[in-house]
Amino acid sequence: MRTRALTPRREKFIAEFAVCANATEAARRAGYSHRSAKQLGSRLTKVDLIQRLVTEKRQKDAIRLELKKEDVIASLLRVVELGRERGDAAPVVRALVEVAKLCGFYQEQVVKVPLSEEAERLKRKYAAMSEDELLEIIAGNDVAK
């Protein structure tokens, strides 16, 4: 996806997404409308610059907090053991899911789908639009371009 300059809302999105890892929630917290947050959040996570800055922020936060992946996994495995001892499956499952994510078991799979000429034309058209124009389209207003 094409890179655009960072707006204050995009900077806020980066900060929020780095923490919550939920694009819709991060978009809402960044000030995007609740109606368009899902679409915009998804779109923003595909912007190369935003991906890079989110990764950098997470790395800086981990260094600042002196967190290491191994320590996080070890803590989660302690939660698993406590849950098993208490016979409480919910924290066991949640902790194991998080361990699996940290180990890369839930890596997003990217599948390239060839687009028709018309789809490519629309892709270029929408990529060239401003956020305000895209919000107008999402809101159901016709934007002549």
Image: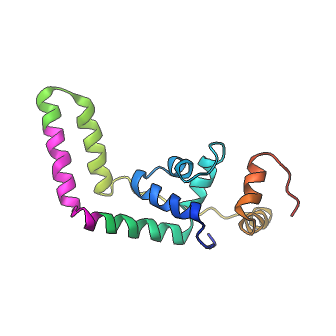
Q: Quadrant of the N terminus?
A: bottom right
Tell how many labels.
0
Give residue 59's quadrant in the image. bottom left
Residue displayed at 26% across by 43% down: 96
Q: State left or right for residue 113 relative to residue 72.
A: right
At a point 29% along the width and 55% down the height, the residue shown is 102
**Does residue 136 appear left or right of residue 52 in this picture?**
right
Q: Which contiguous range is marked in magenta? A: 62-81
Identify the residue at image location x=62%, y=61%. Answer: 113
**What secondary structure is the stretch in magenta mostly built from?**
helix
Pick the front one: 99 or 118 = 99
Q: Identify the residue at the far top of this view.
A: 87
Instruction: Report which quarter residue 129 is drawn in.
Output: bottom right
Name the spot of residue 138 as percent of width and height, x first. 74, 49
Q: Which one is nearer the viewer's eye here, 97 or 50?
A: 50
Residue 24 lies, in percent from the top left, at: 54, 48
| Colouring mode (rainbow / by chain / secondary structure / one colour) | rainbow
For the C terminus, the quadrant is bottom right
- Front-lying residue, 98 or 138: 138
Eyeballing the image, is 93 above or below 104? Answer: above
Q: Residue furthest right?
A: 144
